[in-house]
């Protein structure tokens, strides 16, 4: 590949905010973007976990800072984004990764759990995107990457509300494209398949489920979180300048077969 082609993926001089990035997929994405030379902003609600993640990246001589805010609190989000923009620098790339999981049969799913799940998985994407995009609109460019799921497309027992939240994020991605593409902003989504993370710990520890998953997935295995980084760098870079409103499934082929 020529240097000119490789330069399309270079994120030098750009700042990326990744929500919910103190561990798991979020931390992997932060590391991947930083290795592509972006300055990354780690986000979490808990200061200790955010600082730990920041230190891990800095030990690799990667450019990392931290921003503490809860994506479900619109006023706090707005204040945090204003502070980042004025004190740290413009946010060129936003990755909406913060998310939670709750498991129960739909008929017994607690209203409180439904509301909490929607506040984090859906409302949080709206709050952070709205706060960040106001600055992107003024500058006439920006990248937003929403983290969806194979459950944006497929349902499974005991996680119907999670699937509903991720299906909504997929459609919100399209809606953001409809409103903001003409202003030079690309909004796309990554839909991970089954990756071995803390969020999926109950499934990872279930030998029957792991056996089923490996048989069901054409790749025959769980995903490694680092395997999401290529998609993130692509969607964050100039290489995807005419890609908009799309959801890229990174799932080992799970959604392509029956």
Image (cartoon, rainbow, N blue to C red):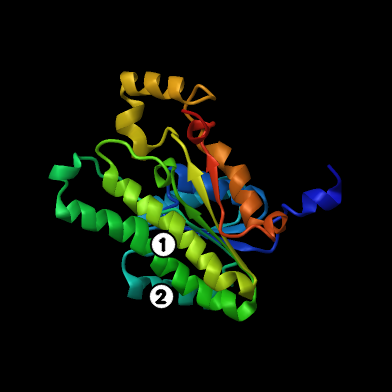
Residue beneath the point at 17% across and 46% down:
109
Q: Secondary structure at mark 2?
A: helix
Mark with earlier residue (1, 2): 2
Residue beneath the point at 60% across and 56% down:
63
125 to the left or right of 186: left
Image position, residue 96 (x, y; %):
46, 57
Q: Say if residue 229 shows up in the picture.
A: yes
Residue beneath the point at 16% across and 55% down:
112
Numbered badge on residue 221: none
Image position, residue 77 (x, y; %):
39, 70
Which one is in front, 62 or 71?
Answer: 71
Image position, residue 28 (x, y; %):
52, 44
Q: Is 68 rendered above or below residue 61? A: below
Q: Quadrant for the N terminus, please.
A: top right
Labels 1, 2: front one: 1
Image position, residue 29 (x, y; %):
54, 47
Q: Is 68 rendered above or below residue 20? A: below
Q: Quadrant of residue 219?
A: top right
3 to the left or right of 53: right
Q: Secondary structure at mark 1?
A: helix
Q: Determine which residue is flagged by label 2.
A: 78
Could you classify mark 1 by the number of other residues whose Cα lies within 10 Å: few (under 14), some (14-19), or many (20 or more)? many
Numbered badge on residue 125: 1
Q: Quadrant of residue 102?
A: top left
206 to the left or right of 65: left
Callout count: 2
Which one is in front, 77 or 173?
Answer: 173
């Amino acid at each position: 590949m020529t240097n000119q082609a490789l330069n399309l993926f270079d994120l030098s001089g750009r700042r990326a905010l990744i929500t919910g990035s103190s561990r798991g997929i979020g931390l992997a994405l932060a590391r991947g973007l930083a290795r592509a030379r972006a300055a990354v902003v780690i986000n979490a609600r808990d200061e200790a976990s955010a600082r730990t993640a920041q230190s891990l990246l800095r030990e690799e001589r990667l450019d990392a800072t931290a921003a503490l805010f809860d994506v479900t609190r619109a006023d706090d989000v707005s204040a945090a984004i204003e502070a980042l923009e004025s004190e740290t620098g413009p946010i060129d790339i936003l990755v909406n990764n913060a998310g939670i999981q709750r498991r129960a049969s739909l008929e017994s799913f607690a209203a409180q759990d439904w509301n909490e799940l929607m506040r984090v998985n859906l409302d949080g994407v709206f709050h952070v995107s709205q706060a960040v995009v106001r600055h992107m609109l003024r500058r006439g460019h920006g990248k937003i990457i929403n983290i969806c799921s194979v459950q944006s497309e497929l349902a499974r027992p005991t996680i119907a509300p999670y699937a509903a939240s991720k299906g909504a994020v997929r459609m919100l991605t399209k809606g953001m494209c409809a409103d903001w593409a003409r202003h030079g902003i690309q909004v796309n989504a990554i839909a991970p398949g089954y990756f071995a993370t803390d969020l999926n710990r109950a499934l990872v520890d279930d030998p029957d489920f792991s056996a089923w998953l490996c048989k069901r997935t054409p790749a025959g295995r769980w995903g490694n979180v680092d395997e999401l980084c290529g998609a993130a760098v692509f969607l964050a870079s100039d290489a995807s300048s005419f890609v908009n409103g799309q959801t890229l499934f990174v799932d080992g082929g799970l959604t392509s077969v029956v």
